[in-house]
Image (tube, rainbow, N blue to C red):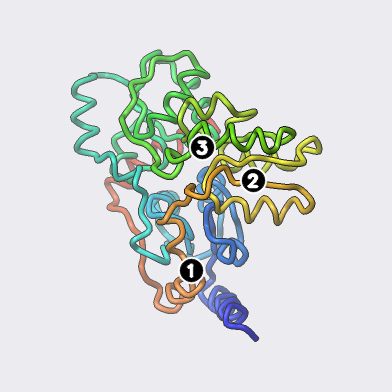
Amino acid sequence: MNNNTELRTEIQRLKGERRAIILAHNYQPGEVQDIADFVGDSLELSQQAARTEAQVIVFCGVHFMAETAYILSPEKTVLLPDPHAGCLMADMISAQKLRKKKRELPGIAVVCYVNSSAEVKAESDICCTSSNAVKVVESLPQHEILFVPDKYLGQWVASQTGKKLHLWPGFCPTHARILPQHILELKAKYPQAKVVVHPECRPEVDALADAVLSTGGMIRYARRPDVRQMIVGTERGIIHRLQKENPGKHFILVCQQAVCPNMKLITLEKVLWCLEDMQPQVTVPEDIRLKAKSAVERMLKVA
């Protein structure tokens, strides 16, 4: 029995003992995805966290995702296997900075990408994910909207809706590393391949794609019978799931630099340790939780 097999066996034993469920984002390492009860994107995981009857949620992702799980299920214990698994984009905005911007634009509707802290969500009117951002913005009666914190996702949404979006200057460093020349080089090498990129990419990258989709959208797109080869413009962790679910198809990562170091902090050992110690726990102060929950629930009604 190898070490990973022993780890997986012990994780399953403790998961049953703790009445826990393990959720993993599509960017997690393959071995972590393989022990999860549910693998998905931000919206899917938010909804799963709300539905689960487990007493403990082990969230294999980054901090804002675990916060969202707690926001929707405060009666449950939410564990994040590595407390240092943050999000650089989420760190580019704070509630204090958002309040200042709202004073500069009085009365404006605020749409907050779910990749943000609970405090920022609490200052927003409605949340969105990359999969439902267009639908969320279209659901609002206002023509002018403050969109935080991802300027690239915001630019994509503006191009799809025709609304005037005031964009916060945040971005995902991992997706910003994907450049047009990466796409062009791969298209020349694989002319039959479909090109699918994430809306956190630069607009000039989006323009070269056959489809601009969330990770969940990419998973569904890959199942299409006409897709045999696919150039994948997002974080490399998704390749594991794409290959696992679509044997015989060829998935080409757009560039080797498309790696989120925070997503890779979660390991099988850390999943085991958090179940053993029931730490580190993620919580949100109740006043902030209630305000953030309103913004998340408005999103879930639209989605």
Q: Residue at x 80, y 35 (%)?
A: 226
38 or 75, nearer to the observer: 38
Give the numbered dot on residue 300: 3
Instruction: Decide if residue 301 is in sight here.
Output: no
Q: Residue at x 40, y 32 (%)?
A: 126
136 sits to left or right of 110: right
- Mark 2, secondary structure of its residue: strand
- Mark 3, secondary structure of its residue: helix
Q: CA distance from mark 1 to mark 3?
A: 30 Å
Disc 1 target residue = 267
Mark 2 burial class by Cα count in 10 Å: few <14, some 14-19, many 20+: some
Q: Residue at x 72, y 53 (%)?
A: 245
Give the numbered dot on residue 151: none
2 or 3: tag closer to the N-terminus: 2
Q: CA distance from mark 2 to mark 1?
A: 24 Å
Q: Nearer the viewer, mark 1 or mark 3?
A: 1
Tell me if label 2 and label 3 are in contact, CB under 8 Å. Answer: no
Disc 2 target residue = 252
Which amino acid lies under the numbered mark 3 shown in the image of this protein? Leu
Q: Residue at x 46, y 60 (%)?
A: 264
Relative height, residue 32 to residue 256 (above, below): below
* Location of residue 59 in the rendering, given as x and y in whole percent from the top left corner: 47, 60
209 or 113, nearer to the observer: 209
